[in-house]
Amino acid sequence: MIVAAVPRLSRLVEEVWRPLALLFAWDVAVTVGYFVLPFHAPSLPLTLFGSALALFLGFRSNSAYQRWWEGRVLWGAMINASRNLSRQLRNFLNIAEAHDLRRRIVLRQLAYVNALRCQLRRQPVDDEVLHFLSKGEAEPALIRANIANGLLDGTGRRIDDARRHGWIDTILQSRLEATLVDIANAQGGMERLKNTPLPTQYRFVPIFFTHLLCLLLPVGLVETLGIATPLGSTVAGLMFLAVLRIGDDLVDPFSNTVHDVPLSAMCRTIEIDLLQSLGEEAPPALLPVRGILW
C-alpha cells in the first residue's frame, strides 16, 4: 500500500509511460496526416462519448475500491479476533498446567494468519508456518489443501483438549469457539474476494471503449486544436487511462503489489500483540520502504 503523501514521480512514469507513448504517437500521426493530407476531420460528439465513459469508469472504480476496502475491513476483523483469542486464552487458561497449551495455541494463530497471507498472495506457505510451529505440530495442516483452515481446525481441537483436561468448561469452550467462527468468517470473506473477479463485462467494456475514445480524440480535436492536438489529446486520454488503471490496481486487494492491502504489516501487528500478551519479546513493527507498506 502506498503510504507516501505524494506518489513518487518515478513510479508514476513507470506505470503510465507505455500507454502515454502510444497515445502520443497516434496523436502525432493524426495531426501530421491532417496537415499533410487533404482530409476533413469528422465532427464527433466527443463530449457525449467522454461523459458516458467517465460515468462508467467512475462506477467501475467505485466497485473496485469497495472490494479493496472490504479486504481491509476483513483483515481489521482478523486483527481484532486474534487479540480477542489471546486475551480469552490468558483469562480462561490461567492455571500453571495450561500455560504450555495456551502458548501453543497463540503460536498456531500466528502461523495461521501468516499462512493465510501467503495463500491470498499465492506465495509458498510452509516456511512461514514452520517459523512458528515445529514440523510435527504443523504437518497435519501442511498436507491439507487449505493450510490456513487446517491450522484453525487444529486450534479448535486443542481447545477441546483443554475442556477434556478440565481446564475450561463447555461455556468457556463455546466462547472460544465463537471467536474461531469470527476468524473463519473473515477468512471466507477474503477467499471470496480473491477467487471471485469482477464480471467480464466490467473488465472488457471499459477497456474497449477507453481505447476507442483515445483513438477518436485526435480525430475530433485536430480541427480545433491544430498543431496542439498531440498535447491536448494526450492529456485528455491519459486521464481516462489513469482511471482505468486505478480500477485494475484496486480490484484485487491481495495481489502483492504496491496497491494492495498491507498484509505483511498487519500480520506483524498481530505477532507483536500476541507475543507481548505472552510476555515474550516481539519483533519491531514493519515500516514503509520507499513509501510502500507491504
Image (cartoon, helix red, strand yellow):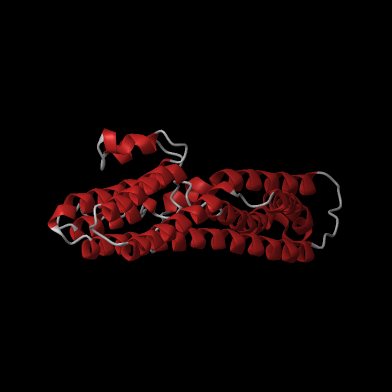
**Is residue 139 something that shows in the picture?**
yes
- Residue 270 location in percent, x, y? 30, 57
Q: Residue at x 15, y 53 (%)?
A: 97
| 127 horizontally vs 6: left or right | left
Q: Which quadrant, please, contains the N terminus?
A: bottom left
> Nearest the camera: 69 or 108?
108
Q: Is residue 120 above or below residue 279?
A: above
> Nearest the camera: 266 or 87?
87
Q: Is residue 81 above or below residue 203?
A: below
Q: Residue at x 42, y 38 (%)?
A: 123
> Nearest the camera: 112 or 18?
112
- Residue 283 location in percent, x, y? 20, 52
| 204 horizontally vs 21: left or right | right
**Is residue 6 something that shows in the picture?**
no
- Residue 110 location in percent, x, y? 30, 50
Q: Residue at x 34, y 49 (%)?
A: 155
> Nearest the camera: 108 or 23?
108
Which quadrant of the view contains residue 41? bottom right
- Residue 217 location in percent, x, y? 73, 55
Q: Residue at x 21, y 55 (%)?
A: 275
| 285 horizontally vs 210: left or right | left
**How many numbered circles does the render carry?**
0
Q: Is residue 174 above or below residue 105?
A: below
